[in-house]
Amino acid sequence: MTQTDFTAGAVPVEDHEKGVGEESLAPQQTRIMDPWSYLFAWLGGCVSIGTFTIGSGLVGTLNLLQTFVAIAIGCTVIGVALMINGRAGHKYGIPFMVQARSAFGFSGTRLPALVRSVPAIVWFGFQSWIGAGALNLVSETMFGYSNIWVFFIGFQFLQIGLSVLGFHGIKWLENIGSVFIIGSLVYMFFSVISKYGTEISENLVNVDGTWGAPFWGATMLFLGIYSTMMLNVSDYSRELRHEVGSVRQVVIYANSILPATLFMGLIGLMVSGATGQVDPIKVFSSAVDNKLLLVVTLLFIAFAQVTTNILNNVVPPAYALMDIFKLNFRTSAVVVGLLAFCTFPWMLVRDESAAGLSLFIQTYSAFLGPIFAILVVDYYIIRKQTLNLGHLYDETGPYRGFNPAAVIATVIGVVAALIFSGISWYASLVPAGVSYWLLMQYLPAARRFRD
């Protein structure tokens, strides 16, 4: 039985294993993800065409070694940050929307929900268009039929259908797809080196690049691709078995995110540096000469968009809709899929859009960084890793309304981030975290949020 009374301090409890598509905001007791399933889920969820585009955008700024190091630094920060912010979800089985209530309040959580959901829906549309383009090229290559709009609409509804299966569907989809994804990434990487080795050596290896501000800005961009997941990591860690400790979690995150990001980022840099192309479909179609291998590569691109979208771009905004509008998960997942149609993704894949995507990442990272800092300070310093579940599920309790300390600290962090826009996520952390701690200590209106 699942208790669902969220009022009067009652704590809803999931005391049975959820069925397919039966997602809930209640504390999750039965965990369906073992360490391997969790690793495969993150691996499949991190093969982002956005990473490819970021790599493409670094041509002429960084050389191959500098890009490699920038990705490694970004992914190391990601792994540690995911573990830190995911502790609350792993310990208590609560999702991000519930975790944020202690810092922002029941009404105040709409701010982090909006900040997290908008990038997710935009990336959902962008990656769906890329996947549809891959399927369209497969059809054109094999059957001579080409209609990108038919494939886009069909591909989007396929993903909507898969997303309503919830974490049970995510688990089997990611487990099955990880081997295919790893093999395809390795194949594409070495195919690119084989075909464009001379151009890569001339344009990316034997150039100076820079270790200055653009290099650190690049680490932020690769980190920024996943800064959304750093915010809502509790949505995933609540499904991970209790016995998996903090160190092991960092290892899982590193061994899933780093390989996928390295392959996709470096492939984007190398191919764009050699050919000048930014559109990944055009890139891969020019890099692969064998017709069968081209089809396999394009199918990989399409499949990778499914695994990434369902894990990273459906669950967070769906949980936000569940919390704010009291919808069930399946309805929320359908709404998210339909909203992705409205992001005009065909405008984002143009060659001239690469710089715009980088700006988009910098901008939303300016908002995500402060919220991440506030959640970490709230859980580790204010609450000392002990949450009052009764208050988290009591809409009329001390967390009612919004916490002005969190809102003010978010604004302070965003201002700092926009001033230092090239490293917006980094720049926002200390101002937001310190100001939140001070406001929680001395702002009278925040007193009731201190347990």
Image (cartoon, rainbow, N blue to C red):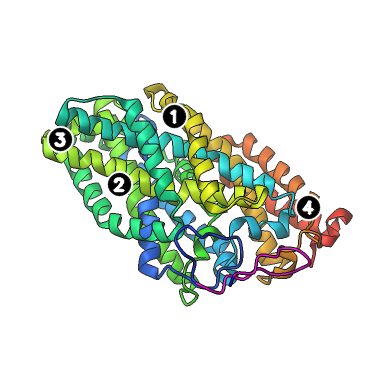
The foreground one among 121 and 49 is 121
Q: How many callouts does the rendering have?
A: 4
Q: Quadrant of residue 280?
A: top left
Q: Which residues are magenta?
A: 2-16
Horizontal and vertical percent position of residue 113: 63, 47
Give how far across and how far down residue 265 sits, in percent.
34, 42
Residue at the outermost bottom position: 243
Q: Could you tell me residue 333's position as x and y percent? A: 51, 47
Is 79 magenta? The answer is no
CA–CA distance in space, label 4 to label 2: 42 Å
Marker disc for residue 403: 4
Q: Secondary structure at mark 2?
A: helix
First of labels 1, 4 by sequence position:
1
Three-letter amino acid code at the position of disc 3: Lys
Pair 1/3: label in front: 1
Give the labeled residue for mark 1. 345
